[in-house]
Amino acid sequence: MYKLIAMDMDGTLLKDDKSISERTKNAIKKAKAKGAKVVLASGRSIDGIYGYLKDLDLISDGDYVLSYNGALIQNTETKEIINFKALSGKDGKILRKVSKDVGVNILGISLKNGLFTPKNTRYTQQVADRNCLKLTVKELDEVDEDDEIGKFMMIDEPEVLNKAIELLPKELYEQYSILRSNVAFLEFVHKDCNKGAGVKALADYLGIDKSEVICVGDEGNDKHMIEFAGLGVAMGNATEEIKSIAQYVTLSNEEDGVAHLIEKFILED
């Protein structure tokens, strides 16, 4: 039996309008009743996840959540930190210089001080709204070097970001874990972090073998956890890269792909 299912949120658990279908809610409720750990694994901050945890009845001493692409693992009720690998204001200075050199906007998300960016755009506002965060317009040089940062994001029009990615210094890939989570978002987290490392750390903490783990997602930042899982699953709306590494392709997020997956591999087991 699969004992843990870790799922991405945007484009996976959530429909395009950011809602969760009743079928999916019921499937998650039944999976939990059967003893499976249901874990949301998102690039979002915990503030942007909490409302969904509440809606899914996943706030208890036995429930856990992965935020910032696996950089932060917490108990959903006690908020106890199981694992956290933070970036700092010092990283912000490094990445701001690079963002200027390659011509893209950038933002950071601080655990204490919310989202900050040198330029507010429709994309930065979208991230702030999605994560339920206060947005402050300020230069990254003004951020305290000791501030704990969950992640930085280079964020711009897709064609601008595509060109910028081609210009990124190679050494940056040795300093950070760099993840494409959206056509307009390139995320930077601690070099030892990704969703796969986060799911592994949680599974180890809970004494669950990787063969008992299902991971499901749709974008590049889901790649590592899909590769790690005993059963790696791509959504029907996933990128071709993600579909190519998955062992199973479920239905799309608009067709209750997560519910279909749970019904097939957990509830029918």
Image (cartoon, grey):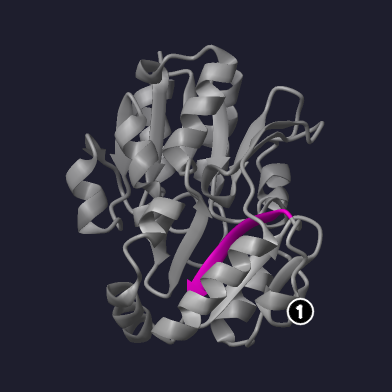
Which residue is pictured at 69% across the width and 35% down the height? 74
Q: Is residue 88 left or right of residue 237?
A: right
**Residue 245 is a magenta residue:** no
Which residue is pictured at 60% across the width and 31% down the height? 29
Quarter of the image with the C terminus in it: top left
Vertical position of residue 162 compared to residue 214: above or below = below
Q: Is residue 44 left or right of residue 213?
A: right
Residue bounds of the magenta highlight: 148-155
- In the image shown, does 171 or 211 lie closer to the viewer? 171
Q: Position of residue 240 (x, y in %)?
A: 20, 57
- In the image shown, does 216 or 118 lie closer to the viewer? 118
Q: Residues within 10 Å of mark 1 (few under 14, many from 20)?
A: some
- In the image shown, does 269 or 199 lie closer to the viewer? 199
Q: Which residue is mark 1?
A: 136
Q: Position of residue 78 (x, y in %)?
A: 82, 31
Q: From where the camera sits, is residue 127 visible?
A: yes
